[in-house]
Amino acid sequence: MENRIYDAAIVGGGIAGYTAALALKNFKTDFLWAGTVPFGEKLRKAERVKNFPSFTGSGAELAELLERQRSAEEIPFLKAKIDGIYAGENFLLTSGKDTFTARSVILATGVETSAAKGARGYLGRGVSYCAVCDGSLYRGKTVVCELSSAAYEEEAEYLAGIARRVYALCRYRGAKFRAENIVAEEGEIAEIVGSDRVGGVLTKDGKTIEADGVFFLKDSAPPDVLVGGLAAEGGHVKVDRNMSTAIKGLFAAGDVTGRPYQYIKAAGEGLVAAYAVHEYIVHEKDFA
Ligand SMILES: Cc1cc2nc3c(=O)[nH]c(=O)nc-3n(C[C@H](O)[C@H](O)[C@H](O)COP(=O)(O)OP(=O)(O)OC[C@H]3O[C@@H](n4cnc5c(N)ncnc54)[C@H](O)[C@@H]3O)c2cc1C
């Protein structure tokens, strides 16, 4: 555990998180910027970006320009998936076995794309987004995990060390596992079934797998899973004009707060959130 207390932690590597980091750097705020990939996966997927002032080209080209700027401005990026944010006197953030402490948080985690039917309803009743956090609940049991990329094979192996059997549904080709109790195939979960708790899954190709627990091993989790007590509206985090959420010291920016899902809107909100964090930190220090 780091003893350092950051003034701010930015969670999410997309354009909202990056713009917030850029502004906090200018404010000379002590911040941590954590995400899965700098500038986010979505930016690199855009074939042609036509609505970003003064820029026309592919998302990958825009990412290159941003990387040049990030490097010139010396903005540090921590490659880490944050799997829990806990509000208290300060915020405690967990990433596997690592923990970080910050006085404020900007949530810039983007939007969830695939959501299997029933995933939300069974949350805390057999559905989890973090193998390290919840794996121990499934000792000797059977779990299904859906992996978004090979980066999550380690987490599935971790589950295999606890559970009796792990069914790994991989949303990519060429998965490789060492543990003998992992049954792997390409696939995706269509629906989670059960009664008061998870009983199994239906896959998109029509198969039924019985299981005691289901793990979605992917880059993002719904924001209210990441932080308890967030107010949500239509699946988005509710914010005011300063990007403040229902939790004191916690701000949100980008797609996570709602439509339109666009770079400029995300970047603009990242900037506003950084200003709000700056105000908040200065104010907190004045009254400490
Ligand atoms: C194919 C495609 C083309 C697009 N084209 C355009 C376009 O031309 N113009 C336009 O304006 N918009 C376009 N968009 C929309 C645009 O990509 C989004 O509006 C923008 O990326 C939102 O930025 P964001 O920072 O809010 O979120 P994201 O870019 O989604 O970034 C969020 C990041 O946070 C990470 N993350 C999530 N949870 C965690 C966690 N717990 N710990 C650590 N990291 C986490 C995610 O993995 C991701 O990297 C396009 C989207 C797609 C999919």
Image (tube, grey):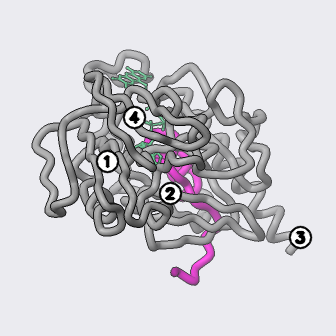
Of 186 and 227, nearer the camera is: 186
Residue 287 is tagged as: 3
Q: Which residue carries the number 4 mark?
A: 201
Q: Which residue carries the number 1 mark?
A: 67
Residue range (magenta)? 1-26
User: Crowdedness of circle 3 by 10 Å Cα count: few (<14), some, many (20+)?
Assistant: few
Q: Outermost residue, bottom direction?
A: 3
Q: Residue at x 31, y 39 (%)?
A: 63
Q: How far apart are marks 4 and 1 (CA)?
A: 41 Å
Mark 2 Cβ and ligand 1 under 8 Å apart: yes
Q: Which of marks 4 and 1 is in front?
A: 4
Q: Reading the chain from its start, which is encountered first: label 4 or label 1? A: 1
Q: Which of marks 2 and 4 is in front?
A: 4
Q: Distance between the residues labelled 2 and 1?
A: 25 Å
Q: Distance between the residues labelled 3 and 1?
A: 38 Å
Q: In which quarter of the image is the C terminus?
A: bottom right
Q: Which amino acid does label 1 sit on?
A: Glu
Dot 4: element = strand
- Residue 249 colored magenta? no
Q: Reading the chain from its start, which is encountered first: label 2 or label 4? A: 2
Q: Which residue carries the number 2 mark?
A: 83
User: Can residue 47 be seen here?
Assistant: yes
